[in-house]
Image: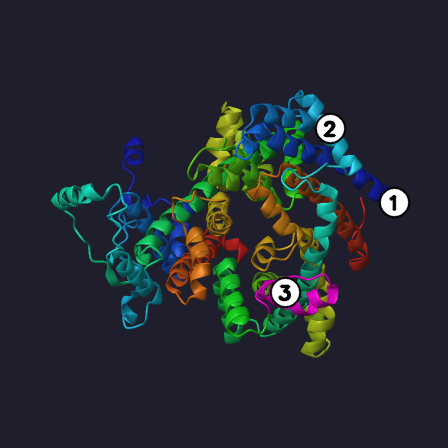
């Protein structure tokens, strides 16, 4: 297994370099001169020239690329172009609120989706199964934006059950006071597609031979579903959760924008609005790396879930 | 003998139906699929008619009072319009007489005479509109039609472009294998290792701040397609790997078909059903993505209207009780997206009956 992990890490290197290259080409070559961006804010040409020199964009591309690679590996992206805040500080302080929202979201969504999927798979083909599927399809078709706008208005503004938006310093107050409405929204929207997917996983397993065997030896349907089918269906479910896990760090940027949660997603949206390239570059590169690491961890964890898996 | 061969009986020459004919036959029997097809076709027709200027060409005219009520609730109070009326009335009241200190006072009369010569039409603004008005009194129904033109066009155009990019790269990787495949797989890994939302936002950041991606709706189409090609690339690549060793491709090689001819003339028609299903799926996804990006201000420019920009306006209108713009944009989008997703499912069932 150690050999497997080492080889996987080794294989990551070209991809990481590729991500760095892609971001570099996008921002330094296509995005190019910050003078264009800054020209709106500063009009003095000498000052712009000075800033260009400070940022190093008047240097040749190979030198800029070298600086960028160095930045990635020293965790030092300098300062934000618009707020002058240290980029590393921005990332570290924004990640907390994002996780406060997203970890409960992933846990609750997965739990509910698995529960409903089992129930729906249990009554497969019946009217209620088809009704649930139709409701899911329709629910998935309404834009997330509409849900946020309506829920925020209904529960925050009209009924006043939750604060319309806001965030505080205290973790508990955030989790119990500000977070519930965004979490509820994300769960509400997230359950439908996952339920559809997990139902198909359960249905795939139900037609397997071992299920027939289990039924043939007289096991009650509950036991067949919960013990035999569930354990096997959990494998693709875990893969799906693993695929979605890196998204936890970006969070739902729409929720963060609407509920003014000072998280990473909102920070990126603000950075895009302000053409604040260092922030976007740093977040993109690090999240790509985190994504690769999580994928590796999920692959290794497979071994423990599914003993048939062998590391090649 | 030869006479018999040259005159075969007409009845025996029944051509066996091709893949598309069979798929169409299956789709026609799928009631849900046909209904969705009609709905999607209706929206496409709407888009074309609106583009051609046949309907909703005057969506930008301010025909009603501010936040005009929908016709079916004409009696409802419209505080905003009343406030504007009051302000206007207040402005028309005779100002305080300043003629003793105002140096321009002697000329006012002359100006007033000149102004009177110019014919002025006072258009009466409508109190109600079929589905209400927005802040400037524009017809929400027409605005929604114009908005659907932009949203659907952006979705379809980006889906087409992404499908072309993905198919081309997938065909190359699957057909050539080896070094080409390694390189494209590396390329694919780079794009998929960055979380999709971030990838879109990174491209959008460069597109909006430099303007190098073009003007109007071109940047958002490019952003969506350049980031979205990976899914179809994977599927097409797998199909090409499967097909490139099949006998018909070997036969094509034997009669001297070039590589390009084998890739696009022989194999492509056999995998195009995969591309079609993906195209349909992409259209749905990109229509939704366009709405969100336009809402955030990274999508279509401000002088255009799309479902996303309508929702952005609707967010503030909801608080003062003007729900019609939200419902118009949200519902038309929901109907189209539902129909399109159901159509995608039906297409998949019709084109690949083994999957069922």
Asked where in the image residue A207 lies, by quadrant, the reply is bottom right
Look at 30% across and 47% down and name the residue there.
Answer: B50
Q: Which mark is residue A183?
A: 3
Q: Which residue is mark 1?
A: A2
For mark 1, give the secondary structure. Answer: helix
- Magenta region, residue range: A163-188
Report crowding for label 2: few under 14, some 14 to 19, many 20 or more residues within 10 A (C-alpha).
Answer: few
Q: Is residue A89 visible?
A: yes
Marks 2 and 3 belong to one chain: yes
Task: Kindly identify the residue that appears in the image at 53 percent across and 32 percent down.
Answer: B249
Per the rendering, the mark at residue A64 is none
Mark whose residue sits in front, 1 or 3: 3
Residue A197, position as x, y percentages in the image? 60, 60
Q: Which of the 4 quarters of the picture holds residue B6?
A: top left
Read off the chain for label 1: A
The residue singled out by tag 2 in the image is A67
Visible residue check, residue A208: no
């Amino acid at each position: 297994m150690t050999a497997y992990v080492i080889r996987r890490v080794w294989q990551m290197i070209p991809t990481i370099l590729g991500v760095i290259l892609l971001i570099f080409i996008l921002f330094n070559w296509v995005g190019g001169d910050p003078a264009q961006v800054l020209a709106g804010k500063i009009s003095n040409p000498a000052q712009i020239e000075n800033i260009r020199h400070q940022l190093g964009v008047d240097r040749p591309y190979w030198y800029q690329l070298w600086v960028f690679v160095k930045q990635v590996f020293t965790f030092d992206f300098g300062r934000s172009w618009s707020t002058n805040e240290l980029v590393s500080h921005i990332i570290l302080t924004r990640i907390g609120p994002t996780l406060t929202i997203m970890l409960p979201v992933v846990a609750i969504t997965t739990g509910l989706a698995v529960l409903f999927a089992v129930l729906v798979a249990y009554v497969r083909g019946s009217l209620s199964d088809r009704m649930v599927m139709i409701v899911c399809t329709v629910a998935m078709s309404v834009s997330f934006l509409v849900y946020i706008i309506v829920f925020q208005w209904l529960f925050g503004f009209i009924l006043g059950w939750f604060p319309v938006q806001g965030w505080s310093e205290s973790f508990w107050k955030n989790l119990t006071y500000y977070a519930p409405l965004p979490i509820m929204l994300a769960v509400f929207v997230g359950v439908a597609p996952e339920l559809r997917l997990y139902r198909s996983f359960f249905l795939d397993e139900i037609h397997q031979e071992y299920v027939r065997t289990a039924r043939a030896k007289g096991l009650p349907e509950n036991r067949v579903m919960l013990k035999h089918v569930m354990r096997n269906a959990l494998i693709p479910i875990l893969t799906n959760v693993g695929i979605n896990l890196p998204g936890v760090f970006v969070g739902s940027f729409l929720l963060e924008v609407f509920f003014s949660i000072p998280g990473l997603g909102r920070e990126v949206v603000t950075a895009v609005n302000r053409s604040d390239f260092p922030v976007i570059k740093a977040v993109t590169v690090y999240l790509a790396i985190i994504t690769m690491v999580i994928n590796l961890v999920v692959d290794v964890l497979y071994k423990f879930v599914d003993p048939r898996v062998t590391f090649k | 003998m030869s006479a018999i061969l040259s005159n075969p009986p007409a009845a025996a020459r029944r051509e066996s139906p091709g893949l598309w004919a069979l798929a169409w036959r299956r789709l026609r029997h799928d009631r849900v699929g046909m209904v969705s097809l009609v709905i999607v076709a209706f929206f496409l027709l709407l888009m074309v008619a609106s583009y051609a200027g046949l309907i909703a060409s005057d969506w930008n005219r301010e025909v009603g009072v501010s936040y005009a009520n929908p016709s079916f609730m004409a009696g409802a109070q419209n505080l905003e319009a009343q406030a504007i009326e009051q302000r206007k009335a207040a402005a028309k009241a005779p100002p305080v007489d300043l003629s003793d200190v105002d140096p321009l006072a002697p000329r006012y009369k002359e100006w007033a005479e000149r102004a009177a010569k110019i014919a002025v039409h006072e258009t009466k603004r409508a109190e109600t509109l079929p589905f209400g008005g927005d802040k400037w009194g524009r017809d929400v129904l027409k605005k929604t039609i114009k908005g659907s033109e932009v949203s659907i066009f952006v979705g379809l155009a980006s889906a087409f472009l992404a499908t072309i990019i993905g198919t081309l790269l997938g065909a190359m990787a699957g057909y050539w294998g080896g070094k080409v495949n390694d390189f494209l797989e590396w390329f694919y890994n780079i794009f998929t290792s960055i979380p999709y939302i971030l990838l879109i936002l990174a491209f959008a950041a460069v597109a909006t701040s430099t303007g190098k991606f073009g003007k109007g709706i071109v940047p958002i189409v490019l952003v969506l397609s350049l980031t979205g090609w990976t899914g179809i690339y994977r599927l097409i690549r797998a199909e090409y790997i499967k097909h490139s060793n099949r006998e018909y491709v070997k036969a094509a090689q034997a009669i001297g078909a070039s590589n390009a001819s084998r890739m696009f003339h022989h194999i492509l028609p056999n995998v195009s059903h995969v591309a079609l299903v993906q195209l349909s799926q992409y259209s749905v996804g990109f229509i939704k993505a366009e709405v969100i990006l336009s809402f955030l201000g990274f999508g279509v420019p401000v002088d255009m209207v799309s479902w996303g920009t309508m929702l952005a306006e609707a967010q503030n209108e909801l608080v003062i009780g003007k729900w019609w713009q939200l419902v118009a944009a949200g519902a038309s989008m929901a109907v189209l997206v539902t129909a399109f997703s159901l159509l995608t499912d039906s297409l998949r069932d019709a084109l690949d009956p083994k999957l069922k």
